Image (cartoon, rainbow, N blue to C red):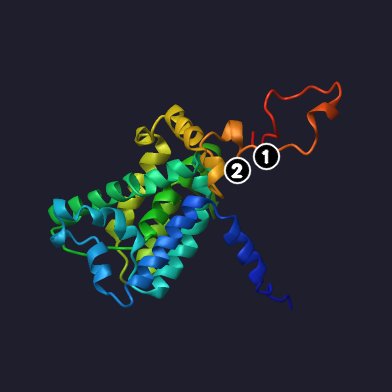
Amino acid sequence: MPSLPAFNPTRIRSYIFRLPLTTRLLLAAIVGLWAAAIPLPWVRDVAALSPDKFDFTQMHRLNLFPLTHLNFLHMLFNMLAIAPLLERFEAEFGTIVTLSLFTGPFGLLPGGLYLLLEKFVLRGNTTVMGASVWVFLLLSSEAIKTQKTNPNFQVGPYKIPTWTTPLILLLLTSILVPGVSLVGHLCGAAVGFLWGLGYIKFLVPHEKILRWIENKLNLLGRLPHYVSVDQKTYGRYGVLPSAVPLGGLGGAPRSPELGQRLGP
């Protein structure tokens, strides 16, 4: 009888230590808000996205509701789901882009869309919170990317379009997990599809501006686990020093940059 793989805390610790900077900050903010809500329950009420409590003085709710959770299990499951997706996104687009999107448009857009649908279309007043809106946003973005190389997947005699995968997971989650917001998850998925299709890429500042900020502030040198926006030049964690002296390369062709480049 095959044995189950043994729990290895060393691997978990190693994975946590490899997480890039913005992923760490957002996960820490999720844990911090959950911990703060234990002695101060009003923290959860202030951060949750409630249609009847929302006005222009409550804009902070659009940024805080994905970081706020009902209880420990709600937080734990969302963190387990969001961590690998967020890490992959940051590895592709860089720390500064990820930070600007997830503290801005990726909260404002799904949250604003939810308020419009809930208040003016459904005429409801359901309060939502939790990072699952980001989970379906990132899943939808990944589905669009996968669609280009693998348009369909086979289930028995049926061919199902790859881009529908997040919607299938969304429906299953709504059926199997009590108390989840189908509309909230759909709003997150809609923004993810728009991002994957390139319709809202204008929300990211131009790469030249981001590169100038990185160089001016020396973010690669100052911040550990920082991921450069310029993947082609710097790789994931910047330029690493070469172990071979430049004079010892002999007649071999040399790169014009000092160091060894990672990435494509």
| Residue 150 appears in the picture as rendered | no
The residue identified by callout 1 is 240
Q: Residue at x 42, y 74 (%)?
A: 73
Badges 1 and 2: C-beta atoms under 8 Å apart? yes
Looking at the rendered structure, the secondary structure element under dot 2 is loop
Crowdedness near tag 2: few (<14), some (14–19) or many (≥20) residues, C-alpha within 10 Å = many
Camera-side residue of 192 and 153: 192
Q: Residue at x 33, y 57 (%)?
A: 185
Q: Is residue 125 above or below residue 62?
A: below
- Residue 187 point in image, percent of width and height: 30, 51
Looking at the rendered structure, the secondary structure element under dot 1 is loop
Q: Residue at x 36, y 74 (%)?
A: 71
| Residue 182 appears in the picture as rendered | yes
Q: Which mark is residue 204?
A: none
Camera-side residue of 50 and 230: 230
The residue identified by callout 2 is 237
- Residue 110 point in image, percent of width and height: 29, 50
Marks 1 and 2 sit apart, C-alpha to C-alpha, by 8 Å
Q: Amino acid at mark 1?
A: Leu
Q: Is residue 47 left or right of residue 255?
A: left
Choose top left, top right, bottom left or bottom right for residue 135.
bottom left
- Residue 98 point in image, percent of width and height: 44, 45
